Image (tube, coloured by chain):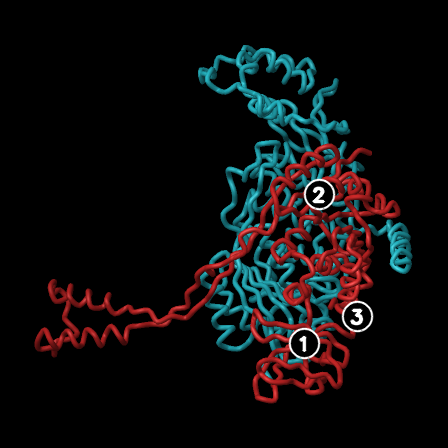
Amino acid sequence: MEHSKDQAMSENQNNNNNKAQDPNPRFASEGCSVLLDVNDGDRLVFARLSSGAIFKIGNTNYSLKPLIGAPFGSLFQVETGEEGSFLSRILPIKKERSSSVNVIDDDGRDNRELIDNNESQNLTVEEIEAMRREGAKGEEIIEALIANSSTFDKKFQLSQEKYKLKKQKKYAPKVLLRRPFARSICEAYFKKYPARIGFIRVDALSLLLTMANVTAYSDVLVVDMVGGLVTGAVAERLGGTGYVCSTYKGDSPYSVEMVRMFNFTDKVKERIVHSPINELSSPKTASPEVNNQQGGVCKPEINISESSASDMVEDASVTAEAREVDDVVPESKIMKAPQPGAKASKEAVEMWKENGFSSLIMAAQDQDPWILAKEVLPLLSYSAPFAIYHQYLQPLATCMHNLQQGKMAINLQITEPWLREYQVLPSRSHPHMQMSSFGGYVLSGIRISTTS
Amino acid sequence: MLPTDSKKALSFKRCIEDGDLVIVYERHDVMKPVKVTKDGVLQNRFGFYKHSDWIGKPLGAKVFSNKGKFVYLLAPTPELWTLVLSHRTQILYIADISFVVMYLEVVPGCVVLESGTGSGSLSTSLARAVAPTGHVYSFDFHEQRAVCAREDFEKTGVCSLVTVEVRDIQGQGFPEKLEGLADSVFLDLPQPWLAVPSAAKMLKEDGVLCSFSPCIEQVQRTCEVLRSDFIEIRTFEVLLRTYEVKEMKVETGAVIGENHDEKENGGQRPSKRKHVSNEDDYAVSHDNNSSTAATSVVMARPCSEARGHTGYLTFARLQCLS
């Protein structure tokens, strides 16, 4: 017992000393990628912080400057001052525990007196606008709306809460500053553009990482045709050790643009590399020409921060995001993030040929998983686990069958994750009325030695 | 188990050595952890296997018993370990584990607190996620379980990443020395709401808490307490559906037969069977056709039985007050 306590103490100290290189930065700095969560997940938008960056809520543009230097997790609210509206940090007041359970049980009011004739609100649009121009706070507008609603008092208590929430979202929107993690990036994409990430839901992504045993110091091979989501998620778990090697067929690597949404340090970015399948699977002693080619182009693209920090160029992915959601950010105002993903060095490729990769994740849309698996599985060490994602079941079933027949892998299993969210409130807990009914299929297994 | 020791990392060249922990794989539902020793012998329904035959073979290799039956020797991973560990308590399984690790935003270097330790199924996966520089502090009020868990972490080689302490977290809260140091906290307790205030003290701002409870009443009470210090309170249930895959012979002959009839009746295209002289002959050839037209198709369907409920996962993020 004494022993473990000492260990705990020394670990604490280590942790304090390491603060400079916190794997988990707590403050949003200029140039970093952030996720803006408007009104409790109603809208999720990626942005890159700079003093010129602008974010649109409703019809108004807001500067993102107040967010620079703020801790992640801080909450902002729209306020109107002399120079127009701006985002202002709000510090939440500690809420007292409310015991509203009994009140709800006793509330006999219901919706019998509600008539849908659009006459219950006595304030006109013009009057509300006038209040706004005069600099009324969101809460004040909401109070005025409630005071002028002829039906509010007749509503069931829960409906009253819902009414307030609805008005708050419209007149006093809140923006939560969030750290982009594999989790939040996957969720944001799944919500807005599921097709771009091959319909990988966050629980399916978490399964892929688990089943492929991704951990520090491992060399993970990925076939990432989902924009870099898988590559980024793996790099996040490697924390600047090992490698994530994105392999591809044909002439050019698949885009891993999404990697830029993560706030990776250079140390982590250096571990994201790519290499074509034929190079990884060519015999160990490559011909001199091939070697020259490889040597020459080692890390050509990695050119990180020096050039980009001063470059005020559009961040393609962010604006694409923003433009379509109709939120946002004039192109010239956003800072370009450095592009990770260099060609794997000759030494690394040789090392993988000799030792094999420690695991594999495939998320190849529009590709036959079996055709690919046949080529890339032999690149794995014996006993290495792998996870293959697909949005269709049949190609995975065929792949599994062929792997079984060819005795290439064991512990094969096709799984489909199922995820349901719940509303939990006093006396009102139930599953959400809407749920995602599909998050993808995962074929997992372990590569075995075919020579016995 | 974790490749932090490069000598032990998986590779084509890495061979099984005396003292290694391997998972002996018979079938997907019959596996066993075995510590390899020079004089060791494994006995199962297939006969006996001498460990000395294993040493020098690569991991992932097939090895044979005295009766010529084989098993595979696999490198341990947290997933395989979850399937073979001895259940001292109800354990967390892969779907919940994966989701928890991702939703708690655990990355290398993080400090994670956990209570109770239980059988150490989640702890092993948390250790994998915080490696190489982070740490998992795991607490259980059960002295003997803590001892067993420590032994297990020693065996799987994650003990440098996990510290197990005996402590009643519901009653005493987490130890003060960890205040403000935790990136994430995981609670698997009968009355998690009692531990929430202490967990809030341990977490860094914006840190994430997860509470696992099988019953909705537990979730209800936990959420009520969470609302005072936490935001983004969300409750999930995550399950897995597994599929069985089979190759089946499917008859496609009937379709061909119908086509023939159409052709006979319509008479628009020249019949392939001009030599067929009467109806009886036709019937026979039809049968032949249909039997030769059966093809093999690989098909998948969900397995009939599945785990229907494990527990509710409630996540919450500590409010930022500074």
For label 1, the crowd category at 10 Å Cα-Cα, with few meaning under 14, some 14 to 19 and many 20 or more, is many
* Marks 2, 3 in one chain: yes
**Hey, which quadrant is residue A29 in on the image?**
top right
Residue on which disc 3 sits: B5
Q: Are marks 1 and 2 on the same chain?
A: no
Residue type at numbered disc 1: Lys
Give the mark nearest the N terminus, 2 or 3: 3
Q: Nearer the viewer, residue A355 or A33?
A: A355
Q: Observer-nearest residue: A103 or A96?
A: A103
The residue mark sitting in front, 2 or 3, is 2
Residue nearest the viewer, comparing B258 with B73 = B73
Estimate the x, y position of residue B289 in percent, counting from the top left: 23, 74
Give the Cα distance between marks 2 and 3: 39 Å
Residue A292 at least partly seen: no
Question: Residue flagged by tag 3: what amino acid is it?
Answer: Asp
Name the residue tied to disc 2.
B191
Which mark is drawn over residue A353?
Answer: 1
Chain letter for the red colouring in the rendering: B
